[in-house]
Image (tube, rainbow, N blue to C red):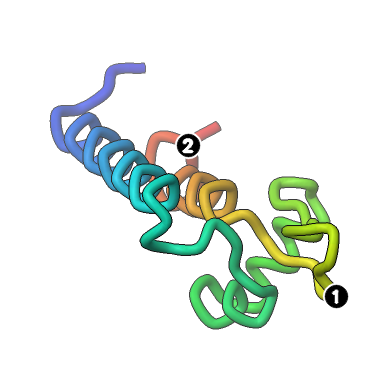
Amino acid sequence: MEITLLTLRNMLADAAEIGAQTALTKAGLIKPWISKAEAFRRYGEKTVKRWIAEGQVKLRYPSINAVKKHINLEEIEAVNKAYNTPIYKHF
């Protein structure tokens, strides 16, 4: 399977976006975790529930004192990018 220039450009843009998000998280400018409700709002409730059921995304306690489970932002963004990239839809 040959990767088109457009697909390659989109893949590189996605990688750059995830890298920037990682840098912002490590710098403390954005939180590394989002709530399940926030994930539902961003990506759709059915989609997030499917990703959780498939094991693509895991609910975790972000700290020892946390009351509710959250989703790692990098993890869910990577899964979202994978599902929205045309090359992954053909497999």
Of circles 1 and 2, which is in front? 1
In the image, 64 versus 18, the foreground residue is: 64
- Please give the name of the residue rendered at 54% of the width and 82% of the height, measured from the top-left corner: 41
Percent coordinates x, y for residue 85 in the rendering: 39, 44
Q: Residues within 10 Å of mark 2 (few under 14, many from 20)?
A: few
Left or right: residue 78 compared with residue 70: left
- The residue indicated by pointer 1 is 67
Q: Quadrant of residue 59?
A: bottom right
For the point 35% across and 52% down, which residue is it? 24
In the image, 67 versus 56, the foreground residue is: 67
On residue 88, the disc is 2
- In depth, the one of 4 and 17 nearer the eye is 17
Which mark identifies residue 79? none
Q: Does dot 1 land on a helix, a strand or a loop?
A: loop
Q: Nearer the viewer, residue 18 or 56?
A: 18
Quadrant occupied by the N terminus:
top left
| 8 sits to left or right of 38 | left
Amino acid type at image mark 2: Tyr
